[in-house]
C-alpha cells in the first residue's frame, strides 16, 4: 500500500502531548492506547545540558553584568533561539490510515520504530518529550527536542542553536530554498519511508514540475501587465474626460455671455430711422450673426456631448476590466503560492531520488501527453 508522509511543526504544548489535559479533538476512552517514549521537564533538560557550560562562561567574565544567572530564562525571554522545537509526523490521512481503517496497525508500528530511533540518529537534537497519539482521528507522533551544539567559540561553549546543531549532523544550507532545516526534514522523511517499507508501506510522494510553476509565473506576469496597461488607459480616459467636461463648462459660460454682453443685445433704432431701415440695417445682420454663433455652439455642444458619452462608456468599461483582471491576478497569486510550495517539495524529491529517476517516472506521462497532442492535431486537420 502507498501512503503519504506529513511532517508539521507543532505548537509545543507539552502538557497536551502528555495528556495532562484533553482537547476537544481527543477521545479520552482511547487515550490509554497512547505511547510515551520520554517525558522530561524542560527546565531539568536545560539544567543538565547547560549548567556546566554556563559556569565556565561566567568564570571568564570580568564584569558581573555579563554573567548569565539562568540560561533557561535567557533563551525563554530572548529572540534569537526558541526554547525547544516540536515536529509532528503522520503517515497517510484520516481517510486511508485513520482510526478504524484496516492499515492503521502498520502505520503505528512504523511511527513507533521511528520514535525509538530518533535520538540515536539525531545526537544534537535532545529529545525530551515524545508521544504517539492514538486517541485522535489519525495516529501521529509528537517529538519535542532542544537543538544544541558543543565546542562553540562564541558565548557558551555548549549552547542552544538549531542551525549549528543541524550543521553538526551534516546538514549545511546552500540557500533560501535549501536550508539546513529543509535538508534535515527530507532526510527524516526518507528514514521514515525506509522504516515504513519494512512494515509494508510505500511512500507516496506528492509533487509537481517546474514547468507548471513557470507557466503560472508567466500568466501572473501577463495579468499584471494587462492590469498596468488598463490602469494607464483608465488614467488617460479620465484626463480626456476632464478636459471635455472643462470645455463643456466653457461653452455654458459662453452661452450665458450672450445674455448679458452688449454686442449680443439688439440695439434700439436711432431717432428718425424707419422700420424698414431698422430691419435691413440692424435686425437682419444681427439675426444672421446670431444664427452662425448658435449653429456653431450647437455643433460643438453635440460633439462634446457625444464625446463625453463615449468617454464615460470607455471609462466604465476600463474600470470593469481592471477590476476583473485584478481579481484574476489575486487568484493567480494564491495559486502560484501553493504551486511554489509544491515545487519546493518536488525539488526535495528530485534531490532525494535523483534527476534520472524523476525523468524515468515522468516519461510515461510525457509520452501520453505527446500522443494526446498528436491526436488532437490530427483531428483538427480533418
Image (cartoon, grey):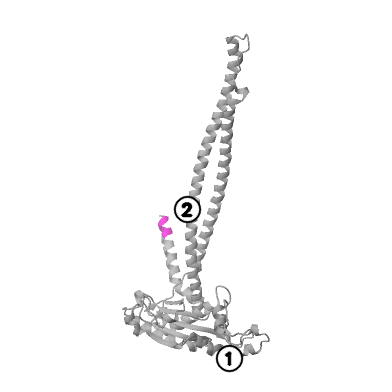
Query: Given this view, does label 1 or label 2 mark the residue nearer the observer?
Result: 1
Image spot of residue 219 (x, y percent): 51, 59
Q: Which numbered marker is on residue 324?
A: 2
Please provide the residue range marked out in magenta.
376-381
Q: Is residue 251 above or below residue 212?
A: above
Residue extending farthest right: 62
Q: Is residue 22 above or below residue 268?
A: below
At x 57%, y 46%, the residue is 236
Q: Quadrant of the C terminus?
A: bottom left
In 3D space, how far apart are the residues under numbered discs 1 and 2 (Cα atoms)? Answer: 64 Å
Q: Quadrant of the N terminus?
A: bottom left
Image spot of residue 317 (x, y percent): 49, 46
At x 55%, y 45%, the residue is 238
At x 39%, y 80%, the residue is 21
Residue 293 seen: yes
Asked which secondary structure carries label 1, the reply is helix
Residue 161 seen: no
The count of marks equals: 2
Q: Nearer the viewer, residue 89 or 363?
A: 89
Q: Is residue 382 above or below residue 84?
A: above
Q: Would you identify the image quadrant in which residue 263 lies?
A: top right
- Circle 1 crowding by C-alpha within 10 Å: few under 14, some 14–19, many from 20: some
Direction from residue 145 to residue 52 in the image, left or right = right
Q: Would you identify the image quadrant in which residue 165 lies?
A: bottom right
Amino acid at each position: 500500500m502507498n501512503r503519504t508522509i506529513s511532517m508539521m511543526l507543532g505548537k509545543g504544548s507539552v502538557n497536551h502531548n502528555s495528556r495532562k489535559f484533553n482537547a476537544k479533538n481527543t477521545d479520552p476512552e482511547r487515550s490509554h492506547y497512547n505511547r510515551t517514549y520520554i517525558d522530561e521537564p524542560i527546565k531539568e533538560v536545560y539544567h543538565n545540558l547547560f549548567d556546566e557550560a554556563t559556569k565556565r562562561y561566567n568564570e571568564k567574565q570580568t564584569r558581573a553584568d555579563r554573567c548569565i544567572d539562568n540560561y533557561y530564562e535567557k533563551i525563554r525571554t530572548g529572540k534569537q533561539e526558541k526554547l525547544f522545537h516540536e515536529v509532528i509526523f503522520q503517515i497517510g490521512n484520516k481517510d486511508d490510515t485513520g482510526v478504524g481503517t484496516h492499515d492503521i496497525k502498520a502505520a503505528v508500528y512504523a511511527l513507533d520504530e521511528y520514535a525509538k530511533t530518533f535520538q540515536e540518529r539525531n545526537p544534537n537534537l535532545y529529545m525530551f518529550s515524545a508521544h504517539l497519539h492514538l486517541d485522535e482521528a489519525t495516529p501521529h507522533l509528537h517529538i519535542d527536542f532542544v537543538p544544541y551544539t558543543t565546542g562553540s567559540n562564541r558565548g557558551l561553549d555548549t549552547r542552544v542553536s538549531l542551525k549549528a546543531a543541524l550543521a553538526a549532523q551534516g546538514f549545511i544550507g546552500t540557500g533560501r530554498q535549501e536550508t539546513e532545516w529543509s535538508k534535515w526534514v527530507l532526510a527524516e522523511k526518507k528514514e521514515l519511508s525506509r522504516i515504513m517499507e519494512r512494515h509494508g508501506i510505500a511512500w507516496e510522494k506528492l509533487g509537481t514540475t517546474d514547468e507548471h510553476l513557470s507557466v503560472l509565473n508567466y500568466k501572473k506576469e501577463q495579468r499584471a501587465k494587462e492590469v498596468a496597461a488598463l490602469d494607464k488607459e483608465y488614467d488617460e480616459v479620465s484626463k480626456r474626460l476632464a478636459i471635455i467636461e472643462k470645455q463643456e463648462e466653457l461653452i455654458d459660460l459662453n452661452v450665458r455671455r450672450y445674455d448679458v454682453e452688449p454686442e449680443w443685445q439688439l440695439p434700439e433704432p436711432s431717432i428718425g430711422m424707419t422700420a424698414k431701415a431698422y430691419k435691413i440695417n440692424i435686425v437682419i445682420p444681427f439675426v444672421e450673426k446670431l444664427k452662425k454663433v448658435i449653429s456653431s455652439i450647437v455643433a460643438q455642444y453635440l460633439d462634446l456631448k457625444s464625446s463625453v458619452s463615449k468617454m464615460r462608456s470607455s471609462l466604465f468599461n476600463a474600470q470593469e476590466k481592471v477590476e476583473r483582471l485584478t481579481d484574476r491576478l489575486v487568484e493567480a497569486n494564491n495559486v502560484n503560492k501553493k504551486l511554489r510550495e509544491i515545487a519546493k517539495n518536488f525539488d526535495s524529491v528530485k534531490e532525494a531520488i535523483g534527476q534520472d529517476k524523476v525523468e524515468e517516472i515522468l516519461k510515461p506521462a510525457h509520452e501520453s501527453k505527446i500522443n494526446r497532442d498528436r491526436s488532437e492535431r490530427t483531428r483538427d486537420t480533418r
